[in-house]
Amino acid sequence: MIYVILRFLALVFAKILFRLEASGRNNIPGTGGFILASNHVSFLDPVLIGVASSRRLSYMTRHDLFSVPVFGWILRVVQAFPLRRDSNDISSVKEAIRRLRRAGGLLIFPEGRRSLDGTIQKSKSGIGFLAARSRVPVIPVFISGTQRALGRNARFIRPAKVRIYFAEPIYYDSPASKDNYENFTERIIQEINLLSKKKED
């Protein structure tokens, strides 16, 4: 119930302040596990992608944010789980795979950190590993407008048009290897870059 209330409030906030639009939501599977892989420029990204998604999502979130009063509680309510980004956090990876195998949805930012200038940065191969182990589809996502609304160095939120594009699912179909994980991740990044060109249409 608390999640439903928070999601409704976030959706109203997104519609009023950001005139949120989303296209391609039909590419999110109606059943089974799936991964949304998106570019990342703002703290607003997970919130807005979450309300735009047709299904509930889990989030891998920086571990230190869980200790922030109130905000840490909200993270738990929305099914976030901690990730230590600067180490090989095996427990977080196992938790992600567990949720995906239980038919859950997971939002991941392959870049790992917010981009300063909006360009998509070189990414780690973790998404390839997760897709290989869980055998769930990966849906590339591009979000535009949040850099203007709340960029990496911004202190205040301001109104800005936000659009989110969901691409068709991509499946990992190669043997398990580090090179294949990296190649798959690069393919996802290329698809996100293709989606980014839609903002110019």
Image: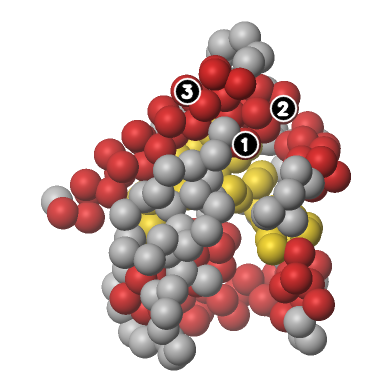
| Percent of width and height locating residue 130 | 67, 32
CA neighbours of label 1 inside 10 A, class few (<14), some (14 to 19), many (20+): some
As helix, strand or loop, the secondary structure at mark 3 comes to helix
Rendered residue at 22%/55% (across/down): 199
Say if 82 sits above or below 165 in the image: below
CA neighbours of label 2 inside 10 A, class few (<14), some (14 to 19), many (20+): many
In the picture as drawn, the residue positioned furthest to the left comes out as: 201
Marks 3/1: CA–CA distance: 11 Å
Mark 3 or mark 1: name the one nearer the start of the chain: 1
Residue carrying label 2? 134
| For residue 159, side relative to residue 84 (left or right) | left
Considering depth in this image, is 200 or 89 the residue closer to the camera? 89
**The N terminus, quarter of image:** bottom right
| For residue 145, side relative to residue 26 (left or right) | left
| Percent of width and height locating residue 17 | 39, 83
Say if 63 sits above or below 67 in the image: above
Rendered residue at 28%/49% (across/down): 196
Residue carrying label 1? 126
Tell me if I can see residue 40 in this picture: yes
Task: Indicate the amino acid at tag 2.
Answer: Ser
Rendered residue at 50%/79% (across/down): 12
Task: Indicate the amino acid at tag 1.
Answer: Gly
Mark 2 or mark 3: name the one nearer the start of the chain: 2
Residue carrying label 3? 183
> Between tags 2 and 3, which lies in front?
3
Whether the residues at callouts 3 and 1 have beta carbons within 8 Å, the answer is no
